[in-house]
Image: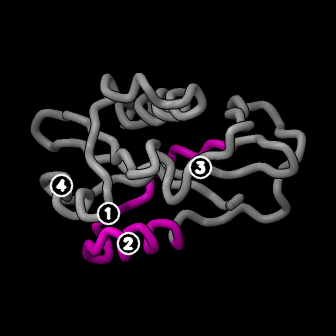
């Protein structure tokens, strides 16, 4: 389905250890896998087909909280991150959200077929998801 995507991560307060939620479909973009023919549009470059309306991340975050069975407010948007994916016929926005808990919600992630991975464990992801994680990591470490 051609809808906005959400990448979720947890950053440990004391150590800054950062882990991304790896989903059961084999990627980090919720809620379904990315289409095969998709590319990240570089920052500052106008996309060939900018959507008329961009989805706000709040409904995606609320959906993720319900899906994981975590309390409302357990995820918050990373306002400095919004990427666009170009694919034949449309452009998809990608947002980033941070888990606010002290520890990652391991049990909740496992219940929906997910797990938390470090950036170094993401090597097997598709090139487009690796690029999204690279950009996300740069924003996370800047903040």
Residue at 20%, 34% (x, y): give it.
Answer: 17
Mark 1–mark 2 CB contact (< 8 Å) = yes
Asked whether, in this view, residue 102 is left or right of residue 48, the answer is: left
Distance from the alpha carbon under mark 3 to that under mark 1? 21 Å
Near-viewer residue (47 or 89): 89
Q: Quadrant of residue 100?
A: bottom left
Disc on the earlier residue, 3 or 1:
3
Near-viewer residue (108 or 54): 108
Q: Position of residue 101 (x, y in %)?
A: 18, 59
Disc on the earlier residue, 1 or 4:
4
Quarter of the picture containing the C terminus is: top left
Disc on the earlier residue, 1 or 2:
2
The answer to whether one can see residue 100 in this image is no
* Viewer-nearest of discs 2 and 3: 2
Q: Which residue is mark 3?
A: 94
Visual colour scheme:
one colour
* Viewer-nearest of discs 3 and 1: 1
Please rate how many residues cluster around mark 1, counting C-alpha atoms within 10 Å: few if below 14, some from 14 to 19, many from 20.
few
- Say which element carries label 2: helix
Label at residue 112: 1
Residue 68 covered by magenta stretch? yes
Q: Which residue is mark 2?
A: 67
- Say which element carries label 3: strand
Q: Which residue is mark 4?
A: 106
Please rate how many residues cluster around mark 2, counting C-alpha atoms within 10 Å: few if below 14, some from 14 to 19, many from 20.
some
The magenta stretch is 59-84
Distance from the alpha carbon under mark 2 to that under mark 4? 14 Å
* Viewer-nearest of discs 4 and 3: 4
Distance from the alpha carbon under mark 2 to that under mark 3? 18 Å
Position of 74 relative to 136 (above/below): below
């Amino acid at each position: 389905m051609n809808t906005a995507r959400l990448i979720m991560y947890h950053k440990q307060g004391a150590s800054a250890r950062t882990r991304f939620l790896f989903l059961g479909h084999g990627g980090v973009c919720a809620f379904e896998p990315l289409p095969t023919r998709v590319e990240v549009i570089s920052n500052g470059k106008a996309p060939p087909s900018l959507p008329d309306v961009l989805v706000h991340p709040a409904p995606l975050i609320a959906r993720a909280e319900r899906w994981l069975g975590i309390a409302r407010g357990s995820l918050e948007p990373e306002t400095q991150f919004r990427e666009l994916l170009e694919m034949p016929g449309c452009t998809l926005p990608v947002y980033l959200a941070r888990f606010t808990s002290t520890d990652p919600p391991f049990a909740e992630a496992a219940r929906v077929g997910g797990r938390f991975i470090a950036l170094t464990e993401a090597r097997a992801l598709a090139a487009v998801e690796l690029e999204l994680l690279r950009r996300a990591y740069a924003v996370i470490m800047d903040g």
